[in-house]
Image: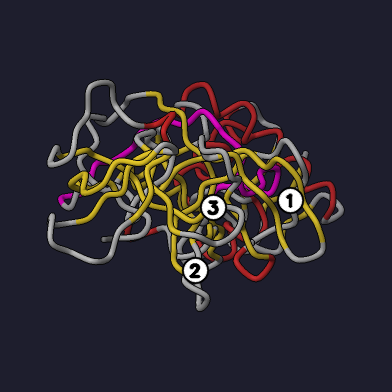
Amino acid sequence: MKLGEKQKLVITKEVDFGVYLSEHPQDRQTVLLPAKQVPKDAATGDEVEVFLYKDSKDRLIATTKTPYLVMDGVAALKVVETNDIGAFLDWGLEKDLFLPYKEMTRKLKAGDEVLVRLYIDKSSRLCASMRYLYDLLQKDSPCQKGDTVSARIYEFSGNFGTFAAVDDRYSAMIPSFEDCSHLKIGDITEARVTNVKPDGKLDLTIRRQAYLQMDEDAEAVLKVLDSYGGVLPFNDKASPEVIKREFKMSKNAFKRAVGRLYKEQKIEITEKSIRKL
């Protein structure tokens, strides 16, 4: 019998308060399915599909309900309450799911909704974790390049970018040069698919299409120019790393914005600088 998973077990004994289940009729190890969960007309020898978890007294128990989260999956769960050692999440069963403090990637409060996985702790109890979700997300999304999607943020990485789950299911990433500083883990943002990789993972952007984004980028360049006293100590041939650091945009987006400003005669470009006119 597997904790945290849906499985088919056999009814081996009927009692007033429910039925006992096991993998095989002759097995000694059994688990209780409470009476209110027993299917109508079920009898000894019948198979029942159940989910196994532990009740408030840490006893193994079965339910015919399907929780929002099972082993080897991910789900967005809502925080019911928090304390000094962790948080309790609503996962659709009578007993809330515990999320230990050490398995959080940010501080939570009641009402927050975050993406988590299920694991078994050292005391053989089911718990939630906000960590190591990457390999559990699906890579068979029906999304195509250009689609607008809903993406939930679950991890920030300075080297790679911002990791997100499209529809809380599919593996996706926003590149590191895009500014996601206004987002936090658990937030849902509208994004556009820029690429579907051969392995099925999605590349996303939270920026608008180039012709719509250009005006906003041009204003951002002017603000940085002002912070430098009207003269940038580099021109449009600066490295992508410098542009990412200063403008939170890609080199292509930067060059488009600079080109717009130059055409509008708001800047001049020299061999070593960009100057505001």
Residue 275, image x and y in percent?
73, 49
Residue for badge 1: 108
- Closest to the camera, between mark 3 and mark 2, is 3
Q: Amino acid at mark 1?
A: Leu
The residues colored magenta run 177-198
Residue drawn where x is 45% and y is 26% of the image = 209
Q: Quadrant of residue 222?
A: top right
Q: Residues within 10 Å of mark 3 (few under 14, many from 20)?
A: some
Q: Are marks 3 and 2 in contact (CB under 8 Å)?
A: no
Q: Tell me where residue 204 appears, x and y as whole percent.
A: 40, 40
| Residue located beneath label 3 in the image | 55
Q: Earlier in the sequence, mark 1 or mark 3?
A: 3
Left or right of 65: which side holds 145? left
Badge 2 marks a residue whose secondary structure is loop
Q: Quick check: is 181 in the magenta stretch?
A: yes
The residue carrying mark 2 is 159
Q: Earlier in the sequence, mark 3 or mark 2?
A: 3
Viewport quadrant of the C terminus? top right
Q: Name the residue nearer the viewer: 232 or 98.
A: 98
In the image, 110 versus 55, the foreground residue is 55
